[in-house]
Amino acid sequence: MIDVQTELECLPDGAEALIRRSVERALTVKGAAGDVCVLVTDAEEIQRLNASYRNIDRVTDVLTFPAWEGDVILCPPDGYLGDIAICYERAEEQAMEYGHSLERELAFLSVHGALHLLGYDHVQPEDERAMLQLQDRILNELGYPR
């Protein structure tokens, strides 16, 4: 189950379903199963989470809390992959900055977060290439090409 939670009233119709579908697609492509909780929040909350869990006191676009690392923010720790937090304000800004739709940016952040929950990372150049290729494949399948 993919549980999307938000207290934001500005979330457009269909955004929660898009996020859910994007996370599900990423899991399916990798043959993974498990529950994921997604929090769509504002800049203030994402900054608080970033400072609390990563000791980085700034706004970011997406944070992940893989269950296998032990830190979770929304769901109980049994039978799930972890949590994703998406900053809606950053998604809006990045969509404008990159010249694509808000829907594409929300799909990208959802897929990116899901892949982190599955152990993908982009610290090393070869890992980043693999993650970017997989993200592009999934986004293309969802109808959100570059």
Image (cartoon, helix red, strand yellow):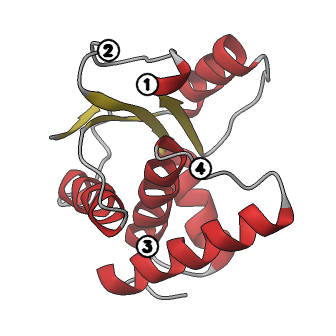
Earlier sequence position, callout 3 versus callout 2: 2
Give 145 or 121, whichever is nearer the viewer. Answer: 121
- The answer to whether residue 143 shows anywhere in this view is no
Earlier sequence position, callout 3 versus callout 1: 1
Circle 2 residues within 10 Å: few <14, some 14–19, many ≥20: some
Q: Which residue is mark 3?
A: 104
Question: Dividing the image into 4 quarters, which one contains the N terminus?
Answer: top left
Give 79 or 61, whichever is nearer the viewer. Answer: 79
The image position of residue 146, as x and y in percent, is: 55, 87
Earlier sequence position, callout 4 versus callout 2: 2
The image position of residue 86, as x and y in percent, is: 48, 42
Earlier sequence position, callout 1 versus callout 4: 1
Q: Which residue is mark 1?
A: 67
Give 88 or 75, whichever is nearer the viewer. Answer: 75
Q: Are marks 3 and 4 in contact (CB under 8 Å)?
A: no
Amino acid at pointer 4: Arg
Amino acid at pointer 1: Ala
Amino acid at pointer 3: Arg
Whole-number angstrom distance, CA of label 3 to CA of label 1: 26 Å
**Picture layout, residue 55 above or below residue 1:** above
* Residue plotted at (43% across, 25% down): 67
* Residue plotted at (49% across, 54% down): 115
* Residue plotted at (54% across, 47% down): 116
Q: Are marks 3 and 1 in contact (CB under 8 Å)?
A: no
Question: In front of the other: label 3 or label 4?
Answer: 3
Q: Are marks 1 and 2 in contact (CB under 8 Å)?
A: yes
- Residue 90, disc: 4
